[in-house]
């Protein structure tokens, strides 16, 4: 038998108040031990950029990554800090890709000069938005607030 993984979820991932359920799954990587003579292929992180959350997707879509001629996503050599920025989007507001699509409808913010970027609450990025250094945006309103222009290392509390 394969090891089981238990994930607590809701029936409707868009609604945290919907019926709570437990999703059981198995790690297919563990299945390799069930086949005689099987072996694994190790694929280095230089060949792919994993996307598990909207944080990862925003980063990969931004200018912090470039696609090589052989279609590999790699860190943009122009990244100011020499490593990928740390992105922390509000996990309740950006749980699903649709929310990220709405936030970036006017454009993906530039992250090439970003070290860390966090967003609490809902925002909309304006065209040509640039995040520089260590930026924290905090919107307490339910309505998304526009984030535009150049934002440097700072906490930006948003109010109507």
Image (cartoon, helix red, strand yellow):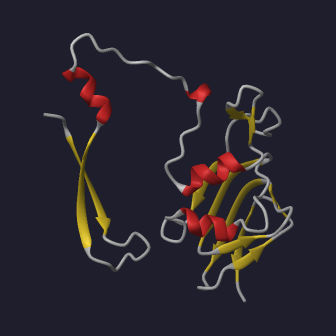
User: For residue 156, what is the image quadrant?
Assistant: bottom right
Residue at 80% across, 32% down: 77
- The percent position of residue 21, horizontal first and vertical second, equals 24, 67
**Residue that appears at 61% across and 51% down:** 57
Q: Is residue 148 above or below residue 131?
A: below
Q: The N terminus lies in which quarter of the figure?
A: top left
Residue at x 19%, y 23% (from the top left corner): 34
Tell me where residue 108 appears, x and y as whole percent: 75, 58
Using the image as rendered, state which of residue 89 and residue 13 is in the foreground: 13
Identify the residue at image location x=74%, y=34%. 82
Outermost residue, top side:
37
Q: Is residue 45 left or right of residue 134?
A: left
Horizontal arrangement in the rendering, residue 97 relative to residue 82 (left or right): left
The image position of residue 97, as x and y in percent, is 56, 62
Total number of numbered discs in the rendering = 0
Q: Residue furthest bottom?
A: 160
* 144 in relation to 92, above or below: below
Q: Which image quarter: residue 78?
A: top right
Q: Which quadrant holds residue 38?
A: top left
Residue 141 vertical placement versus 33 (above, below): below
Q: Is residue 6 left or right of residue 156?
A: left
Q: Is residue 158 above or below residue 34?
A: below
Q: Position of residue 87 (x, y in %)?
A: 62, 53
Quarter that holds the C terminus: bottom right
For the view shown, which residue lies furthest in the left direction?
1
């Amino acid at each position: 038998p394969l090891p089981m993984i238990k994930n607590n979820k809701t029936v409707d991932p868009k609604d945290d108040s919907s019926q709570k359920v437990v999703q059981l799954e198995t790690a297919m990587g563990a299945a390799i031990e069930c086949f005689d003579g099987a072996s694994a292929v190790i694929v280095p992180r230089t060949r792919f950029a994993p996307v598990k959350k909207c944080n990862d997707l925003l980063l990969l879509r931004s200018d912090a990554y470039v696609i090589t001629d052989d279609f590999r996503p790699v860190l943009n050599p122009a990244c100011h800090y020499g490593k990928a920025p740390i992105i922390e989007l509000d996990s309740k507001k950006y749980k699903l890709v649709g929310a990220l699509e709405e936030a970036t409808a006017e454009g993906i913010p530039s992250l090439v000069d970003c070290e860390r970027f966090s967003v609490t609450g809902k925002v909309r990025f304006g065209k040509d938005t640039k995040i520089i250094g260590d930026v924290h945006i905090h919107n307490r309103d339910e309505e998304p607030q526009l984030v535009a222009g150049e934002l440097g290392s700072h906490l930006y509390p948003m109010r109507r």
